[in-house]
Image: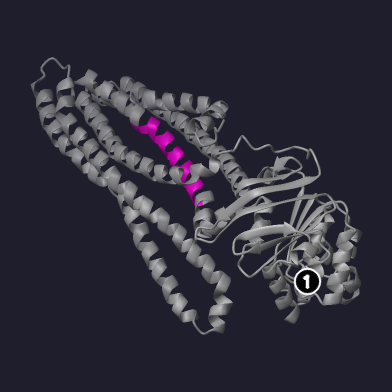
Amino acid sequence: MNKYNKISYYFITNLHIVIPMCITALLFDGLTCFVPILEGKAIDSLLEGDFNIVLKYCIIFFSLVLFVQLNRFFKRYLVRVFGNKMSLKMRTISLDTLFTKDLNYFVTNNTGDILNRNLSDIYDTTEGIRKMTTEVFDTFVLLIGYFTMMFISDWILTLIGLPFLIISVVFSHYMKKIVYKKNKEYKEYVSINKDITLNRLNNELYYRGFGVSEIYYEDYYKSLKTLKRKSIMALLFQGSLEPLYLCICLIGLGLIIYFGGMKVINDTNGIFTIGSLSAFITTYAFVSKKVGKLGKLFNTYQAFKVSWVRCKDYLKIDNNINNCFIPLDDLLVVDNISHKYNEGFSISNISFNAKIGDIIGICGKVRCGKTTILRMLSGLYDYSGSAKLGGYEIKEYRNNPKKYIAHCRNDVSIFSDSVENNITFNREGNLDNALKVSKLDIDLDEIGGLNKILSHTNSNISGGQQKRLQMARELYLDCMLILLDDPFQSVNRDLAIEMINELKNYKNSIIVLVSNNKDILNKCDNILFIDDNNSICDNYDNLINNIAFKELMEAQYEC
């Protein structure tokens, strides 16, 4: 059951904080309502001329204010603790969910938006919860208490000021739609601006090399100006309307002072005194201020709503995923798997079988979908159809803590670390075997040994050595399924043949590799040939009778 995408979950799991928070908040709100009454009593005591009575009311007044503010401190402290715990939990779940997404998600969603949803929006959500929790007590609960005291004190004066309070609330409620719209526009453009910033940082060297850096700087500067404008509009509608709400409320204050003053003058029995009027005016001023903040609360809710809607999808856990299982057999069974990119390219109806110890070659013309097949088999790209490894769908292995699938991509990433750590990543595995099969062992002296620090710019290692280091990474763990995307690129023919012969003796895994190299494909147990979105799986001797496959081999051989 998904629970992390429900606000109630965070309150229920933090009851040990929420309950004391509510107690201190209610004490603060309840006792605050009595402060204006004591203030009025202290003023009336001055008229009696008895110093002891004045002193008594002053001591009671200051003691009550001190106790009220003490409760206010603890309430705000607990609200912040609750907000921090909520933020930490949301970030943890959000990142865990993000890491289980298939790679196509990262292709179809821009990086800036992903970062914004997982960082800024979660922060804004928890800040919104903190502010709304504070305002629920400091505004709604206090308003109820203040209104009760005002009606008890004088219901006529209360009715005189009430219409202006209602007008202020209605106006603030109307403005919330505009606030929501402006906040939504701002949030969306923050994501766009982050993507533009990342793009500029990643490609600045290219821009300078081609002499177009100034052009891209102008575009970036324009995006910053647009962001500034949208930010100003969002802040204007979210935080600058409170004084307007307050002004509407205070119009009624003049009428209360007039009619209240007349009542004090005409009251010969001393029931409605100057102290009573002072207490009523103070209470109404507090109510006006709180009603003004009621609009701010509506605005805070709208800002929170925008962020919550954007980040809650990352808080949904797929409970149907089996996170820990052991393969039931040693087979790879691929049955009519398909994948389609958003831009229109698709590959469909791919089928073949393999067992432990088999090497399957994938070949075909450029952009026929060879790399896409490996991505589907890696479990990192979603697919339709069925692809089972050891009796389980490959996509289920995505979250399995034990590594069963190794995927060697065509592009190589070298990290600023030692050769050994670039292969092992501090994992347990068979380094000697990985070096032997990838033939990287014969170049260790030239590279500088396992402890040689490599550069992420690849400046101190050749293209062929990079490909073999990438292969060594995947062979290191002795995984059940090893996917190699054109691993012999930049490797000379003789060395490539030695490497495929080593892989032929690698009986612990199913190996699926992409290559159009005749010498390599000839060593594979079976070959998956992609031809115009049609696929054929057979051995080399049978496929060579296929005209399209034969032309591909001859073209490669001539090259």
Q: Position of residue 146 (x, y in %)?
A: 29, 26
Q: Position of residue 122 (x, y in %)?
A: 51, 46
Residue at 85%, 65% (x, y): give it.
500
Residue at 34%, 53% (x, y): give it.
234
Q: Nearer the viewer, residue 318 or 57?
A: 318
Which portion, as a residue range, is magenta? 120-139
Residue 494 lies, with reference to residue 541, above or below; the image says below
Q: Could one spot residue 79 in this view of the protein?
A: yes
* Mark 1 residue type: Lys
Could you classify mark 1 by the number of other residues whose Cα lies within 10 Å: few (under 14), some (14-19), or many (20 or more)? some
Q: Quadrant of the N terminus?
A: top right
Q: Quadrant of residue 299?
A: top left
Q: Could one spot residue 439 in this view of the protein?
A: no
Q: Position of residue 459 (x, y in %)?
A: 74, 77
Q: Nearer the viewer, residue 359 or 200?
A: 359
- Number of labels in the image equals 1
Query: Tag 1, which secondary structure?
Result: helix
Q: Is residue 459 magenta?
A: no
Q: Nearer the viewer, residue 71 or 243?
A: 243
Q: Is residue 125 magenta?
A: yes
Q: Quadrant of the C terminus?
A: bottom right
Q: Nearer the viewer, residue 465 or 219?
A: 465
